[in-house]
């Protein structure tokens, strides 16, 4: 144990590190908002949607949940250009995160919807609400409330999983860490710092999602 | 004199005598025995690998055979690694090292180098339509490179403002990015460019400008002027009659650059 830590060697690269943090935040912000949106739509489609849509959504969910994130990323970034769909690495990374989180959050939200008793739907209709209004006010909000902790965990998981987008040269926090490591060769220091940053980001994201939960579900439902 | 001393004396005599025997000219030695021993790589495609039939093959092996043919002798290939290729030459286990050997001052202290026989360089490659002739022309272009490689460090220094450098994890990422059009240009070695050309892509990477150049030379022992002259003569002749170009086309899918 006579390794000499030299954190000053990272000093020159702070701008790279900061821009990496910003990119990671940007990725998870877009990924979480659109991913959960897609997930809610898919959960509706799979449990209450028209008959023709159910197998389509089911196929999408199973495909995404049973293949690795990295392969989905490569498919979108390196594969799609062959059929003329050219995305930048940021677009590719965001799209993959949305598609990935969409499938996982679909199943989580669907669990919440299925836990809603039939009587609750009927109560909504008897109040004169349309099917959509019933879904939005009577079913979805209590369902989200029930599964919010699970959904928060999944969003944090996707944020941590986004580390692999450096593979397609998206310049996120992991890219910054690898970049700095390949320049100053202080692997221990840079990964130490990066681990700490990811930990801080994850804790901050969890707190933020808890806050969103309090705002979305001010009263105790269920 | 007891037996142990006798053995030591004999060993010493043998050791002292060995350099004397080696002083004989290597070229005479080769012509007399009709065997040319050449150190070749076996783990460095496309210069030297072992084929599925376990026979060595590659640019360096073809080069060795070309020289053997020109001299009218049988070639004996000796597989070496990059670490032991120069010791093999120094200890006279081989006459020549044809093992993608680059010239540098440290090596020049211990062995001699023939004229260059194969290109080995880092540079910026791209399709014909993109006009780039020097580092300044990179402004506004997107260029892929393998992160942390020599060409990455160099490119980061020379690229002008406005160049978008995309850094990939490994050579395969860089190749995929180029082939799928995610980057317009790549900075890499001619060996990697050859690997791209091998896939016969719609966009063929052509060399735009060099970043670092270190062509391969044949290594010889010092004080072998006759063998050196002979080897250089063969390189010049095969360069002229096109047989060296055939090898370059076969293994690197490129014509030889003008400096060879």
Image (cartoon, coloured by chain):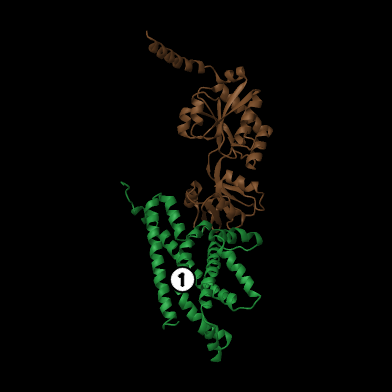
Chain colours: A green, B brown
Tell me if I can see residue A195 in this picture: yes
Determine the residue located farthest toward the right in the rendered image.
Answer: B241
Q: Residue at x 51, y 26 (%)?
A: B89
Residue B97, image quadrant: top right
Q: Chain of mark 1?
A: A
Q: Position of residue A20 (x, y in %)?
A: 44, 61
Q: Residue A99 at x, y = what percent? A: 56, 67
Kindly identify the residue that appears in the image at 53 percent across and 22 percent down.
B224
In this rendering, the answer to whether A12 lies above or below B18 is below
Q: Pick the residue in front: B240 or A67.
A: A67
Q: How many marks?
A: 1
The quadrant holding residue A190 is bottom left
Measuring from the top left, give residue A219's x and y in whole percent: 41, 83
Against B211, residue A216 (above or below) is: below
> Secondary structure beneath disc 1?
helix
Label 1 CA crowd tier, 10 Å (few <14, some 14–19, many 20+):
few
Q: Is residue B9 above or below residue B59?
A: above
Q: Taking the image as drawn, is residue B190 in sight?
A: no
B225, A22: nearer the viewer: A22
The residue singled out by tag 1 in the image is A150
B234 left or right of B19?
right
Quarter in which the N terminus of chain B is drawn: top left
Foreground residue among A180 and A143: A143
Residue extending farthest to the top is: B1
Q: Nearer the viewer, residue B115 or A203?
A: A203
Residue A116 point in image, percent of width and height: 51, 80
């Amino acid at each position: 144990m006579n390794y000499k830590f030299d954190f000053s060697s990272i000093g020159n690269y702070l701008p790279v590190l900061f821009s990496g943090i910003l990119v990671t935040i940007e990725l998870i912000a877009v990924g979480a908002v659109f991913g959960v949106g897609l997930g809610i739509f898919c959960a509706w489609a799979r449990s209450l949607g028209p008959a023709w849509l159910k197998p389509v959504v089911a196929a999408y969910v199973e495909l995404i949940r049973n293949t690795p994130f990295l392969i989905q990323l490569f498919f979108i970034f390196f594969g799609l250009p062959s059929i003329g769909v050219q995305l930048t690495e940021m677009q590719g990374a965001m799209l993959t995160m949305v598609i990935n989180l969409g499938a996982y959050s679909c199943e989580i939200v669907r669990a919440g919807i299925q836990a809603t008793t039939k009587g609750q739907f009927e109560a909504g209709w008897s109040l004169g609400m349309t099917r959509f209004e019933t879904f939005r006010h009577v079913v979805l909000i209590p369902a989200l409330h029930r599964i919010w902790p699970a959904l928060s965990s999944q969003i944090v998981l996707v944020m941590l999983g986004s580390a692999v987008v450096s593979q397609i040269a998206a310049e996120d926090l992991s890219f910054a860490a690898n970049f700095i490591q390949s320049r100053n060769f202080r692997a221990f220091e840079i990964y130490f710092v990066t681990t700490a940053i990811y930990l801080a980001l994850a804790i901050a994201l969890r707190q933020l999602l808890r806050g969103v939960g309090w705002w979305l579900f001010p009263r105790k439902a269920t | 004199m007891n037996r142990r001393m006798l053995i030591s004396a004999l060993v010493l005599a043998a050791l002292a005598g060995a350099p004397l025997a080696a002083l004989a000219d290597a070229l005479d030695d080769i012509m007399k025995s009709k065997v040319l021993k050449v150190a070749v790589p076996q783990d460095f495609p496309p210069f030297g690998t072992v084929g599925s039939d376990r026979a060595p093959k590659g640019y360096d092996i073809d080069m060795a055979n070309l020289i053997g043919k020109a001299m009218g002798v049988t070639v004996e290939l000796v597989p070496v690694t990059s670490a032991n290729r120069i010791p093999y030459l120094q200890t006279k286990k081989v006459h020549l090292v044809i093992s993608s050997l680059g010239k540098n001052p440290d090596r020049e202290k211990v062995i001699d180098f023939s004229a260059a026989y194969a290109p080995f360089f880092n540079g910026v490659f791209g399709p014909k339509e993109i006009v780039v002739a020097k580092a300044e022309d990179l402004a506004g272009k997107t260029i892929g490179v393998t992160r942390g490689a020599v060409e990455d460090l160099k490119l980061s220094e020379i690229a002008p403002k406005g160049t978008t450098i995309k850094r990939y994890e490994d050579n395969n990422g860089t190749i995929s990015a180029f082939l799928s059009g995610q980057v317009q240009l790549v900075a890499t070695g001619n060996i990697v460019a050859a690997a791209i050309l091998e896939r016969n892509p719609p966009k063929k990477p052509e060399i735009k400008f060099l970043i670092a150049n270190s062509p391969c030379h044949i290594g010889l022992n010092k004080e072998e002027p006759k063998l050196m002259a002979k080897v250089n003569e063969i390189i010049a002749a095969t360069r002229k009659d096109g047989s060296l170009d055939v090898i370059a086309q076969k293994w690197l899918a490129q014509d030889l650059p003008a400096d060879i």
